[in-house]
Amino acid sequence: AIEPLRGWLRRHPRLFVITGAGCSTAVGIPDYRDENGDWKRPQPVTYQAFMGDAATRRRYWARSLLGWPVMARARPGTAHRALAQLEHAGRIELLLTQNVDGLHHAAGSRRTLDLHGRVDTVRCMHCEARSPRAILQAELLRRNPGWAQLQAAPAPDGDADLQGRDLSGFDVPSCTHCGGGPLKPDVVFFGENVPRERVAAAHAALARSDAVLVAGSSLMVYSGYRFVQAAVRQGLPVAAINQGRTRADELLALKLAMDVDQALQAVIDAL
Ligand code: OAD
Ligand code: ZN
């Protein structure tokens, strides 16, 4: 079933790869949208709500405390490893990922750009100081004894279902560098823009590429979709490996509605 993709890859040696949540579902991090491209998760917190309201931040970090261990334990799967091999074979100009799980990097990919940031890093919204999420986890557990033994279902952004727990006493630490700034995961929230320099770096890499390969993304979010639009405007062909519908289906030169692990492993085997 991947024969057309093999031929396509032979014709286009230098790739701009766009990945999404479908690359990590097999390793236990669920995706956001169903096969039709419709949102299937609880309503995400917006940037405006997070910044404007301490109770929203309390709730966010309580959910994150529960969900973090699943994120922290996740290891790269077949798709991540295959894309790292494709890079080592000199075939990747840039791997642009919308995932915040860091698994491409963990698999050995280095020509990566984390379009939506990384959930393993925390940022102070006053002084911009960055710190490891693992340190915040230890501090959250220290301040909120009793939460350590709670189990939680995994979620792609490290959040989890609170099941109606009382949060009035939940204690969230603030920045230790400036003494009080609110902490936010270093990921792009709904209602927030992707940093301009990240978008510019991706466009520059696109201009050096022969073609675009999408793997495991519905492309429903404009921040990723715009690079497919730009590629088509520049005359670059776009192929996608995705089980569900994508927003760009009618722009694609090639669509493989199959499992990313299977397709990318087959690509590597044929290199
Ligand atoms: P989506 O959940 O929108 O899309 C994932 C796609 O992968 C779906 O179309 C699935 O059908 C498909 N899929 C799942 N498992 C697969 C598999 N094993 N093989 C092939 N296809 C599979 O995720 P993204 O497109 O990454 O934003 O979502 C983009 C952004 O929306 C995310 O980065 C997040 C969210 O809001 C932020 O966090 C800012
Ligand atoms: Zn600070």
Image (cartoon, grey):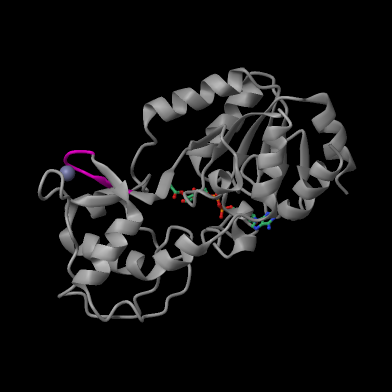
Q: Position of residue 151 (x, y in %)?
A: 41, 79
Going 37% across and 71% down the picture, which residue do you hit?
66
Residue 215 found in image quarter: top right
Q: Nearer the viewer, residue 233 or 63?
A: 63
Q: Position of residue 184 (x, y in %)?
A: 27, 51
Q: Position of residue 221 (x, y in %)?
A: 50, 44
Residue 127 found in image quarter: top left
Going 47% across and 49% down the picture, which residue do you hit?
100
Q: Is residue 123 magenta?
A: yes
Q: Nearer the viewer, residue 196 or 261?
A: 261
Q: Is residue 246 left or right of residue 74?
A: right
Q: Nearer the viewer, residue 1 or 228?
A: 1
Magenta region: which residues? Answer: 122-128
Residue 55 to residue 20: above or below: below
Q: Quadrant of the C terminus?
A: top right
Q: Position of residue 255 (x, y in %)?
A: 76, 43
| Residue 82 appears anywhere in the view | yes
Going 64% across and 18% down the picture, which residue do you hit?
234
